[in-house]
Amino acid sequence: MFDLAILFPVLAVATWVGVPLYAAFARGRFYAIFSAVLLTFALPGALVLHARLRTVLPEPAVVAIDLLFAYSMVVSGVQFAHLVRARMRSSAFRWLVSVPGQTFIAGGMLAGPWLVVLLPFRMLFGALGREDVLFAWTFVEAIPLVVAVASVLTSTTARPETVRIRLAREGPKQIARVPVERIRSRAPGSSARGPGSTRPLRIVQLTDTHLGPWQSVARLRRRVAHLVAREPDLVALTGDYLTMESMGSPGCLARALEPLRPVADRCVAIFGNHDHEAPDHVRDAMKTLGIRLLIDDEACFETGAGPVQVVGSDYLSSDHADRLAALLGRHPRREAHLRLLLLHDPVGFHALPEDDVDLVLSGHTHGGQVGLVSLGLDWTVLSRTRWPDQGLFARGASRLYVHRGTGFYGFPLRVGVPAEHSLLEIFGA
């Protein structure tokens, strides 16, 4: 009789070896290395947890665990293999393969460092002969799997909100986080004046939409339509629209952003880093919808809140100070205009000429992607880095708003950092 205990380990080793080999043969070295690295980070923790859970669960639950881990491993392998010939898939494929597979990989990646942190305690309890404590400790070690499953909700939903940003004529000399007001579940089309009596500039920002297994064309269409119904003055698209799947499906971005067509004359877009992997796909979508793509260029608008100058930067990976100074020098501040800069990666805010723009709109960070934002706290894994992770920041008279993004790419879950679905209300200084 086949021993279920070895099913998951056998599948794990077969996937660990087979997927990178298949990827190297069918797609090339880069994706082979990429898949091998992710599996190497994810599978050791999963293998350890599987073995430990089998020792503490009753027999019926052990069979369920064996089958659950085996299924998760199979769909993870299928997901990795499908990316060799990546394209957008059906809803059934996404929910039966992509979502459970990526959730499993994320759980394994979280489990690895968690188990390392807890290892000294396990060794101590073992040395003391405390088998009773080790029994309970196994469930503490399994917390990353619970977190991964719970994070599916964070990764698939976004709560509507209004974000109020007040500009200023001065501020801290070094970049610092400043308070921002968030109002949950504002009804579409509402436009309360908030602080002061001046009508705010209403902006919808779309960033890091990352069409793919977690963001279908239909879901993004619904989200965009909901935001357009809130009657923004401007729509700013700040990059990273695709994933490997959507890059392999020409036309899907235009279909997803179709609700922007009636307001295309109020829309501007820039490139993010991933857009340079499929620039023609993005250009064609924006051209189809009539959206102006700003590649180191500017656009000016007359709005109900006054004239606005928008400068759009191409994605920058280096030489931020020189390249941003040159861009802003070519497009100097226009008299009586609110001056906005669209900059995909917010790290460039450090290098901006002092007080040269009123507000920068960025994305790129996915809000930090792993953190405690869902609990009402600003902490994320990027909080101690140079990257402003999410929310409002200030340096001098300039303000930076980092949008948490609509989708995500890379690490396969949002953990405690929900997607953003907001209308920005900008109040002048």
Image: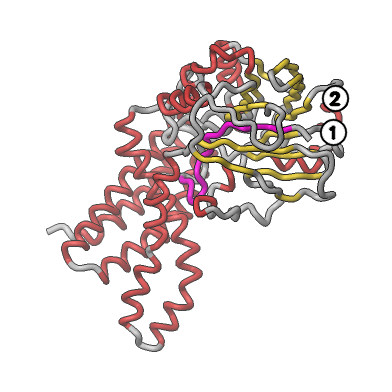
Residue at left offset 30%, top offset 45%: 74
Reply above or below: 306 against 363. Answer: above
Give the quadrant of residue 327: top right
Badge count: 2
Q: Are marks 1 and 2 in contact (CB under 8 Å)?
A: yes
Is 238 on the left-hand or right-hand side of 15? right
Residue type for callout 2: Arg
At label 1, the amino acid type is Asp
User: Which residues are the magenta region?
Assistant: 413-427
Q: Is residue 52 magenta?
A: no
Mark before the other along the chain sequence, 1 or 2: 2
Dot 2 crowding, Cα within 10 Å, few <14, some 14–19, many 20+: some
Q: Return the mark for residue 315.
A: none
Q: Secondary structure at mark 1?
A: loop
Which residue reaches farthest front? 197
Few, some or many residues within 10 Å of mark 1 (<14, 14–19, 20+): some
The residue sitting at the bottom extreme is: 128
Residue designated by label 1: 356
In the rendered image, the vertical position of residue 8 relative to residue 393, given as above or below:
below
State the residue position of label 2: 333
Q: Is residue 243 visible?
A: no
- The one nearer the camera, 187 or 163, is 187
For the C terminus, the quadrant is top right
